[in-house]
Amino acid sequence: MPHIVKAIGEMGFKSGWFDGEVVVPDEQGIPDFQALQNAFDSSRTQHIIYFVFDVPFYAGFDLRAAPLTERRELLKGLFETRSSETVHFGETFDVPANDIIASACRMGLEGVIGKRKSSTYVSRRSPDWIKLKCSQRQEFVIGGYTDPQGSRVGIGSLLLGFYDAEKKLRYAGNVGTGFSAKTLHDLKAKLSKIEAATNPFAEATGIGRNVHWVKPTLVAEVAFAEWTWDGHIRHSVFHGLRSDKKAEVIVRETPVHSTAMKPDSATLPASLRVTNPERVIDPASGFTKIDLVRYYGLVAPLMLEHLKGRLVSLVLAPDRITGQLFFQKHLEKANMPGVNQLDPALDPDHPSFLEIPIAEGILSAAQMNGIEFHTWNATKNAIGKPDRMTFDLDPGEGLEWSHMQEAAELVRVFLNELELKSFLKASGGKGLHVVVPLKRLRDWDTVKDFSEAIVVHLAKTIPQRFVAKSGPSNRRGKIFIDYLRNGFGATTVCAWSVRARSGMGVSVPLAWEELAGLTSADRWTASNIHDRLDRGNEPWSDYEAARQSILPAMKILGFKR
């Protein structure tokens, strides 16, 4: 980029380091990532513009330990007496953060980087700097599908398109995430009825074998991150079929570039009133109550898949997570909109249990200082028969993380030998959760006793790694597999729930293939969760289809009831 080198030289700066972003703007002035790539590939970089937003070193001074606000104040002063068509100071916009994000998304940008004002400049990942990604969303015509791979059933991905001005169906990429087991089954049934012998797209898709073409009559609504240079979408997520739109009217939609349009409001509903929003919940990270409410506003759609229909308990922190915590199973006052009191007849010996069926309930609980959300292993419509079996791998003091990874894999292998399919979840704390989806066939005592038998067998077979009894002295350097989560009334932290621990870790659904690369059980926190949202619940997409009876496993283990 010789023109940038020349421009900086002509501006007369002293020796230092600038941190910024190079872009190639399109006709509307919006950064075009593929145009930037093409500029480098072709060595035609003269249209690249450099926006400077930080200065870690300048004039012999190391500024990395200075707060971001002070570094930017210095940087702004340097640019006040210098100007260039090629090098610019990245301006600050004094408006609410959510308005910035909403405006960026409306303009079609990929997202923004959020930085804590007091943050220092460090050469590593930090929760003080977070990526806030935008998603675009529109309808596409389905022109084909691929075969499923691995344990998935039905379809692998949908091939998508839109009609151009000449009424030709243009290929726009595919979507392979966002499906539930039921959706996969229903889609396969619908697509099988409209199969076609030839490619309906105007051009080749580049997809190899195992492609099935269909008549272009079905319309899918899909969210995605951005369009590529050649008209394909990236990071796509399926949201459903649209029966209210005809396929022939589907075109490529263009983001609105208008500063006159009012940006979307925050993800939080206008009716929600957050008291003491700036109260610090986690002194170690500076995480505040409004940060918590915004987090739950962000992940509520993902979390509801794990909450709906289940009895819920809350961990409350009225002061902060370092203070006294309270476990709440019942609603004493009807002051939490969206949180339901269930029929007392479910358990006549106790007050009404709680259910959170809508996003408003998650936010209401957070406003009332609810940090953690815990769920039963049964749903309200069949409270006497659990629909999952949970194994909580709880490490003792001094245990290396690699041993936790090994232990989880050993549990999985043994469950496979029992012909039980299992799913993995990071606890957000210290351990890992292994979850076995069940058909509602057995009572609580049977499921709990069988889970205990599994744990006892593992502890007897591999005593150097596992113990079957709780207590710090028993599991020093070992792992207690907590089967007590499978008793009536016991709970396990819900997927996407924050943990009331320093750092505000989050419990996240994982694919087993991710275990080897996982660095800790609290790898994701409420501050850095954004880089996980693209995957969402996709690692558990075939969870419902995997529901199974434990009777064959009981026979294999020799467990009698």
Image (cartoon, rainbow, N blue to C red):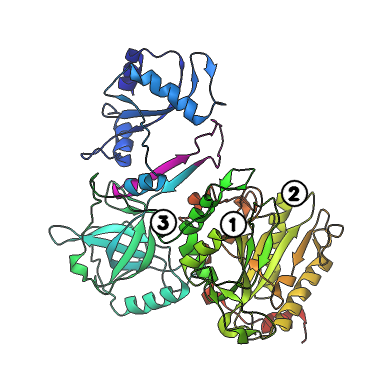
Q: CA distance from mark 3 to mark 2?
A: 39 Å
Q: Is 113 inside the magenta-drawn segment?
A: yes
Q: Hey, what amino acid is under mark 2?
A: Glu
Q: CA distance from mark 2 to mark 1?
A: 23 Å
| Residue at image mark 2 | 400
| Residue at image mark 1 | 498
- Label 2 vs label 1, nearer the camera: 1
Q: CA distance from mark 3 to mark 1?
A: 18 Å
- Label 3 vs label 1, nearer the camera: 3
Q: Residue at x 34, y 24 (%)?
A: 1
Quadrant (top left/top right/bottom left/bottom right) for the C terminus: bottom right
Residue 49, visible in the rendered structure? yes
Q: Residue furthest right?
A: 473
| Residue at image mark 3 | 267
Q: Where, by quadrant of the figure, is residue 514 drawn?
A: bottom right
Q: Which residues are magenta?
A: 104-129
Q: Hey, what amino acid is under mark 1?
A: Val
For residue 552, above or below residue 44: below
Q: Residue at x 70, y 84 (%)?
A: 349
